[in-house]
Image (cartoon, rainbow, N blue to C red):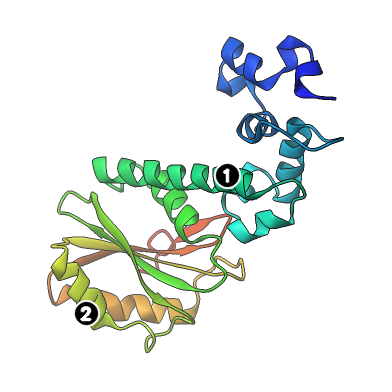
Amino acid sequence: MLLKDLPLNARPREKLLARGPGALSDAELLALLLRTGLPGKNALQMGQELVDTFGGLAGLLHTRPEALKNIKGLGPAKRAEIVAVLELARRALSEQLKEKTVFATPQAVRDYLQLQLGSRPHEIFAVLFLDSQHRLIALEELFRGTLTQTSVYPREVVVRALALNAASVVLAHNHPSGAAQPSRADEALTQTLKAALSLVDVRVLDHFVVTSTQAVSMAELGLL
């Protein structure tokens, strides 16, 4: 069945206009984004397939663009639209963190880090550089690969903090394995960076371990 063959009150676009976006399911919102389906599979069914395949909307947003190629009927144009929505979400969260202190929106920090790092296939070490009001100056990905005290260079983190005139930082790295529990190496690295940054009067406020489903705060665990 084509979307135009559905009753008016069941068509995603008409439903959104009549009742607002909150009335639509994830599959219906995706159907609006996709617009068209395939022979034998309308846009709503494709939207539901995406939800089912990636474990919900959050899973879809955190998936890598390459994984979308495995969905039949999801050509370059549709994949580009989904990736564009993901980038808009990142930018919106970034703007929110620049306007408010990171502690005023802790969930936004977690969401932002998950969108930035959660779906990466390799380990990334990133730093949120903050001003004296704890507002975001920039997020920079500084190191890639297996993270240890020897693979992350404190000097480079200090140099970037000074260049950006940061008053404090939030450290973050991802665990591609999906295990969000900080390791002993993570704890040791945090203490090394904390000591180095303290020499230039820059505070380490937190260190997040990020997966596609969560971002664990080492400060909340008492490990900072």
Residue type at tag 2: Ala
* Disc 2: which residue: 196
Q: Position of residue 89 (x, y in %)?
A: 45, 43
Q: Which of marks 1 and 2 precedes in the sequence? A: 1
Asked if 167 appears above or below 190 in the picture, the reply is above
Q: In this view, does 36 lie to the left or right of 166?
A: right
Residue at left offset 71%, top offset 44%: 50
Instruction: Give whichever of 89, 42 is nearer the camera.
Output: 42
SS of the residue under disc 1: helix
The x and y percentages for residue 144 are 44, 77
- Say if 153 sits above or below 171 in the image: below
Where is residue 14 shown, x and y percent of the image? 64, 14
> What's the amino acid at mark 1?
Ile
Q: Which mark is residue 20?
A: none
Residue named by callout 1: 82
Query: Furthest-bottom residue in view?
Result: 150
Q: Which of 3 and 120 is in front in this view?
A: 3
Instruction: Tell me residue 8's x, y (percent).
Output: 73, 10
Q: What element carries label 2?
A: helix
